[in-house]
Amino acid sequence: MAKNILTVDDSASIRQMVVYTLKTAGYQVQEAVDGNAGLAAARGTPFDLILTDQNMPGMDGLTLIKSLRALPTYRTTPILMLTTEAGDAMKQQGRAAGATGWLVKPFDPQKLLDVVKKVIG
C-alpha cells in the first residue's frame, strides 16, 4: 500500500513539482494551499509524512508543525520543512517545533525522494 503524503505550500508551481516527483515514485499525495488547510486536511486523514513550507499566508509552517505535534496522531509522524529559509536560527526553530528534517528550495527531486524514502520508506 502506497504511503500517503501531505504537501503544504502556497506556491502552486512548487506543489505541482512536489506532487509530480512523489507520485512518480509511487506515493499518494494530497495538497494544501496553506497551514490552515494543511491542518484541516491532517485532522481528516492520517498521513505518513507531511511536507510544509515555512512562509505562507494564514498559518506558517512552524505554527503548523506545533499544531500537528499537539495532536496524538502526529506526535511521531515525520514532518519535513521544504522552504527557502536556510538560516541556522530558522532551522533551530524548526527543530524546536518538531520538524524531522529540512530541505531548501529550489529542491533537487532525487534528494527529496532520498529523504522521503529515508523517513518513511
Image (cartoon, rainbow, N blue to C red):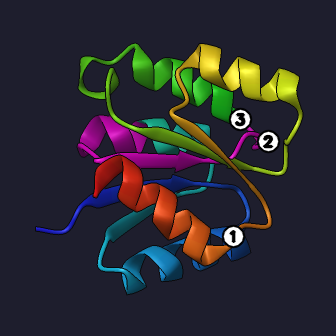
Q: Earlier in the sequence, mark 1 or mark 2?
A: 1
Query: Which residue is denoted by mark 1 in the rendering?
Result: 14
* Residue at figure coordinates x 85%, y 42% from the top left: 85
Residue 53 image point, x, y percent? 68, 47
* Residue at figure coordinates x 50%, y 82% from the top left: 20
Residue 71 image point, x, y percent? 33, 18
Q: Nearer the viewer, residue 116 or 38?
A: 116
Q: CA distance from mark 1 to mark 2?
A: 13 Å
User: Which quarter of the figure is the N terminus placed in?
Assistant: bottom left
Q: Nearer the viewer, residue 69 or 44?
A: 69
Q: Does dot 3 land on a helix, a strand or a loop?
A: loop
Q: How many marks?
A: 3
Residue 33 image point, x, y percent? 61, 55
Where is residue 26, by image quadrant?
bottom left
Graded by Cα atoms within 10 Å as few (under 14), some (14 to 19) or many (20 or more), the crowding at tag 1 reads some
Query: Which residue is denoted by mark 3 in the rendering?
Result: 58
Q: CA distance from mark 3 to mark 1?
A: 18 Å
Query: Which residue is denoted by mark 2 in the rendering?
Result: 55
